[in-house]
Amino acid sequence: MAVVLLPAILAAEAGGKNRFDLDARTVGEALQSLPIADRLFDERGELRRLVNVYVDGVDVRDRGGLGCPLDGVETVRLVGAIAGG
Amino acid sequence: MSMLTSIGTRKGLFLLRGDEERRDWKLEGPLLTGWEVFHALLDPRDGALYACTNSFVYGPTVHRSADLGATWTRAEELGLPGDGEATLEKTWHVEPGRPDEPGRLWLGGAPGVLFRSDDSGESWEAVQGVLQHPTREQWQPGAGGMCCHSIQLAPDASERMYIGISAAGVFRTEDGGESWTPANKGTAADFQPDNFPEVGQCVHKLLLHPERPDRLWQQNHCGVYRSDDRGESWERLEGNGLPSGFGFPLALHPRDPDRAYVVPEVDAENRVTSDGRLGVYTTRDAGASWELSSRGLPEQAWAAVMREGFAFDRLDPFGLYLGTQSGSVFVSADEGENWQEAASQLPPILSVEVAEWQ
């Protein structure tokens, strides 16, 4: 079981809920089960380019990608890329 | 009767509520915070609000509210078919279906795509006749992407409609969207080696006159045009009072097919309002001549009005609504004679629509 934390814009899309306790085989499967999965993944199933996923403080790209096992993970934090105006 | 003006901005949606006098407005919002609202309107058939919402991180979608913005739901199925390379980049324009088609909506987006929904925006299906159009390889994106921004339904022919895509041009269907014919004859593409190609024109906004539906108007990258034959041919109309043929927004008189309204910009390389002022230019003779209508608009302004930033109502006298990139909304309750600032200091305005609603 891991805690997935959402930024405000996605929490608003999830009925105001910014924290989900999820059990899944991988980080990717946990994210796919969120009610806002369509905002994280495009219609090809690819993680949107500017969505960052931090697994216990480490970029998921440095933990083998979305196939990273969820077992032993405490927190998955979703963060939009820092850009824009 | 009350008036509801929906203002799509770079940073959420605002609503202006007023009455038939259209003098005093109450501002609500921002709604849909965090989203860029490219276009939003109230569906006159059931009072639902729809918004084309885009996030540079979380992608494009469409939101719907059945309670005038208090709560929102997001489209559940929206994207390009899985067998292609492209993904949906932006949602640009939502258009309600005909009065006898409850639940049907049309959605324009980038890259040059049209969707249809038959369940009030829960799920959207890409229109294959546009997605697989035989001329698609000749289409090019404009500065805002390859956006399908104009969708017009002919009120006198249930299977006829028009779309405008920048920079692909105008297309007409006579079979409800199955097949699409380019309708660009006479419109220029000065940025191409062939100035009058079959497709590739940069239409900025396309409108059909509701009382004379064979008549179309378009503000194009390369001029202002009118067609009296369902887009079979176009006549270029600028000069004779119009300081520039370049601009984005377009509005029509709801009853007089000879009257149209544009907001010219200097040119494609200097996209600010002409002559250092915010001016609406009006024709009363189908584009033969134009005159400035600016009483109440800023006399010193280098403003910009986006393609969706101009709307008109159906009252008598009818009203015009203008939103600027500088965050001001100007309203004329007397057909463009006099203007009043109804809101200011909003985020950059992308779209303005108005509806009569209880």
Image (tube, coloured by chain):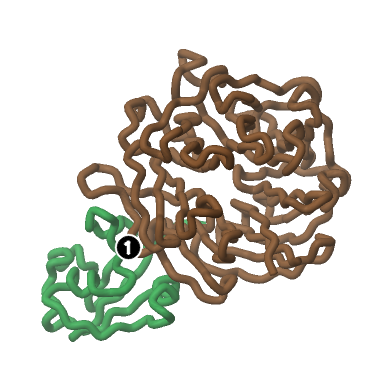
Establish if B67 lies above or below A48: below
Residue at image location 33% in from the left, 70% down from the top: A36
Place of residue B64 in the rendered image (x, y in percent of width and height, measured from the top left):
49, 65
Residue B190 visible to the viewer: no
Residue at 45 percent of width and 33 percent of height? B174
User: Measured from the top left, where is residue A1 in percent x and y?
Assistant: 18, 86
Residue A44: % across, % down: 23, 53
Which is nearer the eye, A29 or B152?
A: B152
| Residue toward you, A77 or A33 | A33
Residue shown at 49%/34% (left/top)?
Answer: B166
Instruction: Count how many numbered circles sit on residues in the image.
Output: 1
Q: Is residue B192 visible?
A: yes
Residue at 67 percent across and 34 percent down: it is B212
Q: Chain of mark 1?
A: A
Amino acid type indicated by mark 1: Val
Q: Which chain is green?
A: A
Quarter of image, res A68: bottom left
Give left or right: position of A70 versus B175.
left
The chain drawn in brown is B
Is B176 situated left or right of B33 in this image?
Answer: left
Nearer to me, B151 or B90: B151
In this orientation, which residue lies closer to the viewer: A26 or B49?
A: B49
Relative vertical location of residue B233 with respect to residue B156 in this rendering, above or below:
above
Residue B115: x and y, percent? 40, 48
Q: For mark 1, give the secondary structure.
A: strand
| Lateral position of residue A21 relative to residue B101, left or right | left
Q: Which of the 4 image quadrants contains residue B258?
A: top right
Read off the residue under disc 1. A51
Mark 1 nearby-residue class (10 Å; few <14, some 14–19, many ≥20): some
Q: Is residue B21 above or below residue B159?
A: below
